[in-house]
Image (tube, helix red, strand yellow):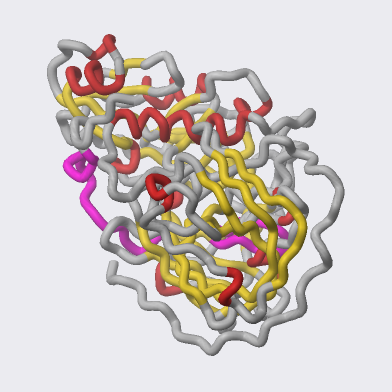
Amino acid sequence: MSAFAVLALAALAPVAFPSPIPQHANPNPNPISFPVNSASQGHDLHWAQQEAARAKRRYSSESGSERLQKRRHGHGSRHIRQPRGIASLKAWGDSYSIRAEIGTPPQQLDLYVDTGSTDLWVIGSCDDNSECGNTATFDSSASSTYTPTDQLFAMNYIDGGRTTGVWGGDVVRIGGQAVNTYFGISKHTTNWGTAQSGLLGLATRAGSSKRVEPWWEAASREWDDGQFGLYLGRPGVEGSVTFGGVDESLYDGGLTYYAHTAMEGWEAGWNIATGGVAVNGRRLSSTVRMAVLDCGSTGIVGPKAEVDAFYAALNTEVIDLKDGSYAFECSASLGINASFTFGDYGGTRLGALPEQHFYLRNADLAIVRGSGEDFAATGGYDALRGRPGTWCFGAVSSWESTTEAADAWILGDSFLKNVYSAYRVEPRGVGLAPLKSSAGGEGWEGVPSAADGVSSG
């Protein structure tokens, strides 16, 4: 697919600041955050292990006493509206960044995008060059429209990293949208080490550590079409976020919308019901579960019994690595034909929707590949030592715990790169459609080598 150009639109007139930051305590002591890896580092097996564990740890602090609620979903309108603005996305292999302009005069900063968290934050100053010496920072003193607060900002990472600072307010422009909003300004970061300057959360207000209205929700008050569309390009292919509409040139057919559904404590995310994974068009479970669409997670995480069934259906040797991860022999070009299913499950519909399969490219089912010795030496997986052939570290992993999260699917980039997704404000839901084309081949040759950039961690 050709690179997608940014649509140049005049900035909207800034709206008034939202109400002051609430003073009540954060109801979630372990907020969802977005630990990132350096874009300049190779995707070695150590990195793959961290990625496989990250989504599980990202959601393991979420709790809920209710099982998945069955909700209604249905087709969305095909009425064509003019998008309010489009911003390009840059692929970094394990994450995606967007360009923001903050303050007056505007300071340009690249931010990671994340549908799995809410808060917007930027690095305000760097106190350790090894952490952020190559990172552009936001200088609040250089902005004539900056509004300080006395509220502390803090975000914890699952790898032990942390960012701390203060909350401030200013105009933030992204994709032709200009909104006065509050955001975190980090004064100290650990375990960052990237050239990106912060994060743009695209989940809802319920997930904010201070219940601050997220940037995109404030912008949506000016949209004619109350949704944003997401296309995750592959390395070398520019992706996009369309604010206030969707880009119909990127997908086949129409979007099918599925209603938001969530267990208690999961209300902030973009969650819909799924029939789970299928191989060659056959569902591997009859259970309907919650699926969290999260572009801040690299792979896919699911219930152990269903993940075990997925790997058992592959026509190749599979090794359970006993930490929620799996390796499979991938010397041959396996015709896996994997998909995730959505549709008319036991009265969860608005209209009669047939079961729909959204297929994954084979190479998206692996994070890294290498020899058995690579896996043993780099990742400590002695079960693969001395085994012949080429092995792939699976992008589909299983929960290790028995928490509420273990009943859900986390559908990260391995799934989202294969679909166009739309996130609708009212009625809240997610629209999905297959992309017109997928960049790259179907084999394993495009999967990074486990031996490249070997880490000793």
Give the x, y percent position of residue 134.
Answer: 36, 57
Work out which residue is located at the far right of the displayed protein and give it.
24
Give the x, y percent position of residue 451.
Answer: 19, 31
Work out which residue is located at the far bottom of the displayed protein and give it.
10
Residue occupying the point 30% across, 63% down = 237
Q: Is residue 82 visible?
A: yes
Q: Is residue 272 above or below residue 74?
A: above
Is 51 one of the magenta-colored residues?
A: no
Q: Is residue 83 left or right of residue 204?
A: left
Q: Is residue 220 visible?
A: no
Q: Nearer the viewer, residue 441 or 183?
A: 183
Range of residues picked out in magenta = 422-448
Residue occupying the point 33% across, 50% down = 39
- Image quadrant containing the N terminus: bottom left
Magenta: main secondary structure equals: loop
Residue occupying the point 29% across, 41% down = 362
Residue occupying the point 51% across, 21% down = 304
